[in-house]
Image (spheres, rainbow, N blue to C red):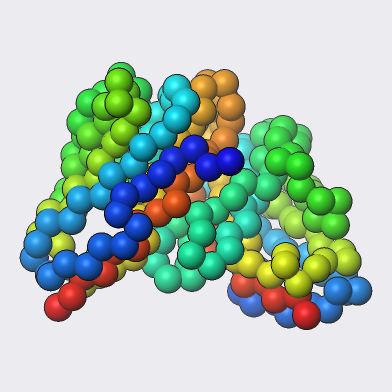
Amino acid sequence: DTEVTQTPKHLVMGMTNKKSLKCEQHMGHRAMYWYKQKAKKPPELMFVYSYEKLSINESVPSRFSPECPNSSLLNLHLHALQPEDSALYLCASSQPNEREGNEQFFGPGTRLTVL
Amino acid sequence: SQQGEEDPQALSIQEGENATMNCSYKTSINNLQWYRQNSGRGLVHLILIRSNEREKHSGRLRVTLDTSKKSSSLLITASRAADTASYFCATVIQGAQKLVFGQGTRLTINP
């Protein structure tokens, strides 16, 4: 299984809502990532988990809260978001390689709209 | 800040022609990767070239890397309509466990 799955595909939420994005992989990868991508822009790294521990937080606002319950799952909890947080949120996984970096496998993304 | 700059930003060619995209970066790298993204979907890894390699091939793809000029190119030969997508280079910064993506090239293959 070389697939990264993400749910939901689309999400519309108000600024006072609490929601979660979910990501799952069964490739045995021990590094998982969250990216944010605005239209016609490249993905921007948000968080990196390595061996289920948060290793990189790219100064992301606290209204985004990541969680890695186990080596196959990655969640992104959302609370009190702003309209400018509307974007495509991509999850990815790879084998960890802090020295060189490995290819990353991406999920299809969750299209988030904040009203 | 973004590490890579890609050129051109958009490219439109006829089916069967070759497409060349260029990527420049700023800092020393461990490797450089190319990804493809179909509209509004996830990214697909195409090829990885290490800093000690100069050229790599995969099917219709040819990637070159010039570390002295801090640049890379992706050549797609005999293009097909299905190659229509955005193409991103991404660098792994030495000592950092993260990919930094270039701005991307939007490639359109006209039938």
Q: Is residue B109 above or below residue B19?
A: below
Instruction: Using the rendered view, name the quadrant where residue B89 is placed.
Output: top left
Q: At 67% across and 40% down in the image, what residue appears?
A: A48
Q: Is residue A64 above or below residue B14?
A: above
Instruction: Give coordinates of residue A39: x percent, y percent.
Output: 54, 67
Q: Is residue A83 above or below residue A101?
A: below
Instruction: Using the rendered view, name the quadrant where residue A14 is placed.
Output: bottom right
Instruction: Using the rendered view, name the quadrant where residue B104 is placed.
Output: bottom left
Residue B40 relative to residue A6: left or right: left
Q: At 72% across and 65% down in the image, what residue appears?
A: A85
The quarter of the image holding the C terminus of chain A is: bottom right
Number of numbered discs overlaid on the protein picture = 0
Q: At 58% across and 27% down in the image, what residue appears?
A: B96
Instruction: Give coordinates of residue A56: x percent, y percent.
Output: 70, 35
Residue B15 relative to residue B53: left or right: left
Residue B78 relative to residue A7: left or right: left
Q: At 69% across and 52% down in the image, what residue appears?
A: A73
| Most foreground residue, B93 or A67 | B93
The reply to whether residue A5 is visible in this rendering is: no
The reply to whether residue B16 is visible in this rendering is: yes
Instruction: Give coordinates of residue A72: x percent, y percent.
Output: 66, 49
Instruction: Give coordinates of residue B76: x percent, y percent.
Output: 18, 53
